[in-house]
Amino acid sequence: MKRVLLILALLICTGTFAQVKEKKIRKYAATIKVKELKEKLTVIASAEMEGRETATEGQRKAAAYIEQKFRKIGLKPGNGDSYQVQYDLFVDSLSSYSLTLNGIPLQPNKDYSVSVNTSANGTWNINEIYFAGTGVLDTTQLDVKDKWVVTDETGFNPLRQKIAQLRRRGVKGIILVSKSFPRATPFSLKSGMDITSHNLSNTYPYLTVSYATLAQVLKTTSLDSASLSAMNKTSYPTNLSLSVARTELKLKSSNVLGILEGSDKKDEYLFLTAHYDHLGKRGDSIIYYGADDDGSGTTAIIELAEAFAKARKKGHGPRRSIVFMAVSGEEKGLLGSEYYTDHPLYPLAKTTVNLNIDMIGRIDPKFKGDSFNYVYVIGDDKLSSDLAPITDSVNQKYIGMQLDRRYNDIKDPNRYYFRSDHYNFAKKGVPIIFYFNGTHPDYHRPTDTVEKIEFGLMRKRVQLVFYTAWEMANRDAMMKRDIPLNIPSR
Ligand SMILES: [Zn+2]
């Protein structure tokens, strides 16, 4: 009997408690203040942070700042006893290259180009070239084994196929003839970054030359597509020498993670993410400050951590654990979040949702409606039918913003669903919502600076995320996963 009474008393308490809580929730949301957002973003988007390019000193400074904030707030380290997860990045570079004809050097970008993505390392003396034909080739009809093969540059996909077929047929090397010389921009000496090694052994001797250069090789005055195709299946003697030195650089970057432990559902997780990296600087004077992109999101997750930590101190901590993760490598191709979701520290199956914030401090000039009261909500129609109703009810109850869902249309040419870190979670089946203000003329320009941020609007958007996260971290069930992600991958 006593026990029944106790349970009854507990139930009543929980009920009253929940009543009090709504007021409390508003109180905790109110701790997210314009002044604090401004203070933090002013540091994150300062010249001191050098544009926060991945694998640079600026990025490391930003990571240290975020870590220090997480620590001060009282979050636990998200990676064992560390707040940061280091990961490797690979970049290839052409340290030297040359092409000579009869011992005389040809000019890069005017006469020829080499590719940092495909060129093998080595030196080759090319004494004979074989004309395999133009356009789409039937390589089964060609005897190209151990030959340097000349073909023209056709459309991207046919070209890739053609090269793959030629390699399967055992060519020694490939010479592409291209009309795009002289190059408008010099060919790149550095590859993009990747979280896996590009495997230098999977490269091949590869060269692109101008029509004029090939004419010089053949000792004719001019050459065009027609004369090239007339040389089908013929060989010519040459005296070319190609030399390429390509090296792989291994760099390091990090994601910063702090965790606020949950109560009765602490083995389930809610992820709040934003990327803290940006585009860095050009020379010493041009800095890409990235105040909106994504200093605003980075600031937001620190403020959110602070608000949830305050609530927890007052005995109103979340039922599920909340992980605050600032990722790097976003501007290099969503690499930090890809690394995380490939090497999760908390089970993705137990990750109820990822709320990702990327650019919430500005106004899209193309937005029609109340510019000071909107946000684009992306992805809440996919993976889970819980996302949209919760978003709507929370918004109605606490915020009253215009939630613009136009970018949920998978046919939208901007493809925003694929363009920030939440996509790596979505790929693994974790329901996501992406909060975004749209682009503006300062997007990816050095003029994306802190004084252009609309802090009042930003605060409102951060609070929307706060209330949504509160609801999702505290409700009985995880977000159900009832909608397959039926969209073509990138
Ligand atoms: Zn961004």
Image (tube, grey):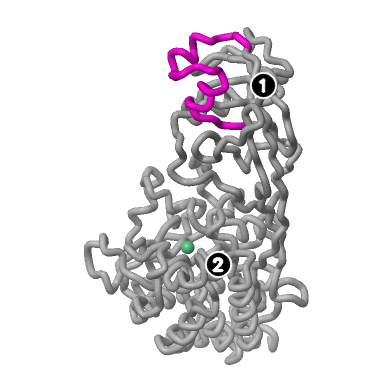
**Amino acid found under the numbered disc labelled 2:** Asp
Helix, strand or loop under label 1: strand
Name the foreground residue: 99 vs 176.
99
Residue 210 percent across, percent down from the top left: 50, 29
Image vertical order of residue 144 relative to residue 278, above or below: above
User: Which quadrant of the structure image shows residue 373?
Assistant: bottom left
The stretch drawn in magenta includes residue 102? no
Residue 2 appears in the figure: yes
The local crowd at label 2, few if under 14, some if 14 to 19, many if 20 or more residues have their Cα within 10 Å, is many
Residue 220 is a magenta residue: yes
**x and y, in percent, of residue 269 in the image:** 63, 68
Q: In which quadrant will I find the N terminus?
A: bottom right
Q: State the residue position of label 1.
A: 148
Examine the rendered structure and indicate whether residue 343 appears above or below residue 49: above
The magenta-colored residue range is 207-235
Q: Are marks 2 and 1 in contact (CB under 8 Å)?
A: no
Q: Which residue is mark 2?
A: 277
Residue 22 appearing in the image: no
Q: Secondary structure at mark 2?
A: loop
> Which label was assigned to residue 481?
none
Q: Position of residue 205 (x, y in %)?
A: 68, 31
The residue lying toward the viewer, choosing from 212 and 478, is 212
For the point 65% across and 15% down, which residue is it?
237
Name the foreground residue: 6 vs 169: 169
- Percent x, y of residue 117: 62, 41
Question: What amino acid does circle 1 point to?
Answer: Trp
